[in-house]
Amino acid sequence: MNKRMSDIARQAGIVGAGGAGFPTHVKLDARVETVILNGAECEPLMSVDQNIMLRDADLLAGMLEKVRLDLGAGEAIIGIKAKHEEVIAAMQEAIKTYASLYIAPLGDFYPAGDEVVLVYETTGKLIPHSSIPLEIGVVVMNVETLWNLAQAEAGRPLTHKWVTVSGAVASPGTFWVPLGVSVRQMIDLAGGAVIADYAVIDGGPMMGRMLADLEHPVTKTTKGLLVLPRHNPVIGVQSQPLTTILRQARAMCCQCRLCTDLCPRNLLGYGINPNQTILAASYGGAQGDKALQSLLCSECGACDLYACPMGLSPRRVNQLLKAEVTKTGIKNPFVGKTAQPDAMRPYRRIPTKRLIRRLNLKGYAAFAPFYPTELQPDKVVLPLKQHIGSPAEAVVKAGEAVAMGQLVAEIPRGKLGSRIFASIAGRVSECSQERIVIERANS
Ligand code: SF4
Ligand code: SF4
């Protein structure tokens, strides 16, 4: 290999496209036994990874082999839900000449794509408590991230994003658009909203977050935009004030334990019992063992959006406890401890179909096909923090002309971060510590 994949990812500003935006170059700066390509796409209504695998299976297979060799891994496993037969067939055909790549068909449950769950389902290995896959010799990459890496290898830095627009829109679809276009423009691309009173979720219904306004830009981590009626339960959980959540938890939790019995992390043996963290928040606060369990919560939402019969939100209670525990400076006592899956796990996984019904999303649950678009935005807004780590530092000034694909912000020296590139050609109309705005020259 001429250039390590880590360098290519760093130069091109690639971050994990399917989650919190961890800089990919850090992940790839390793030697591992196994590379896992995450094609599970377990959030309902998302179709980005399926579209990419259907369109560019050969490109992905070739790139996965390069990553495998670069990281010294003996195997690369592609996790795809067994129900996506067409996608599996396309990938199977693409990998047939690579002896060390193979497909692991996954069950149709939530959250099959959670890194911890995926590693266990595909390798049988469990990542120790509060650790990362690297600890057990594994690197997990999202399908879109690998696709972006292939573009970077061909000399194209990260300037565009694949986004599924779904829910109450006229033509749900998946689009490839310049970073920094507004959510409003994305909804227009999908034919516009078909209801008047709606809210938009950035991401999937389970782990996405409700957006405050439609001018929010598409960033490196925007996977999907979900237009939902305000009365949908997904919106309800997110819009309740924390004081209400806590008051209701104290008054209404009957300690039925359903949240714990169905918690995906508990089922893998990670020792988190959301029914106990609810008690800790109601009566104990951040001190004590039960509150510390919140550190093990992945915030997957299975407890509040699926399990709890009282409509309570152990997830948001855990978020609060986590923040409080972190403030106290108490060390995470679970780091590195091993887990043992619950024998009942195969019977308690959450079937996607049932989840979709529970979330009132049945009317929207269709594949969102890829539609090519000639979207030419007059303006893009590029936040300097679209990733985990320190914000990027601008290397351009207001008034400066920039070309498409030109570097506009660099990783601060010695810090964790990611570079940012101009996604359209134009002139920098704003350059602050938070964002760079580029306007097309003729706009
Ligand atoms: S499922 Fe709801 S009511 Fe039951 S223990 Fe958990 S939070 Fe309490
Ligand atoms: S959000 Fe709820 S179900 Fe998910 S890991 Fe946390 S406690 Fe468990």
Image (tube, helix red, strand yellow):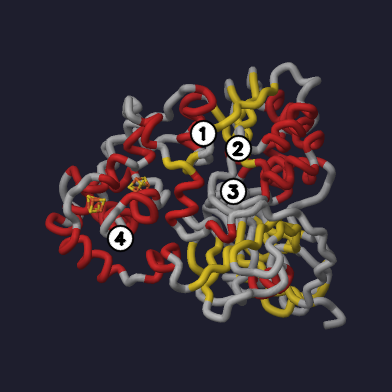
| Residue 429 x, y percent position in the rendering | 73, 79
Q: Is residue 404 left or right of residue 296?
A: right
* Residue that badge 2 annotates: 38
Examine the rendering and report whether any part of residue 415 can be seen: no
CA–CA distance in space, label 2 to label 4:
31 Å
Q: Is residue 27 left or right of residue 259?
A: right
Label of residue 311 in the image: 4
CA–CA distance in space, label 3 to label 4:
28 Å
- The crowding category of the residue bearing disc 3, from other C-alpha atoms within 10 Å (few below 14, some 14 to 19, many at least 20), is many
CA–CA distance in space, label 1 to label 4:
28 Å
Say which residue appears at 42% left-offset and 27% top-offset. Answer: 126
CA–CA distance in space, label 2 to label 1:
8 Å
- Among the two numbered marks 3 and 1 on one chain, the one whose residue lies closer to the N terminus: 3
Examine the rendering and report whether any part of residue 133 can be seen: yes
Give 79 or 228, whichever is nearer the viewer: 228
In front of the other: label 1 or label 4?
Answer: 4
Say which residue appears at 55% left-offset and 50% top-offset. Answer: 19
Label of residue 18 in the image: 3
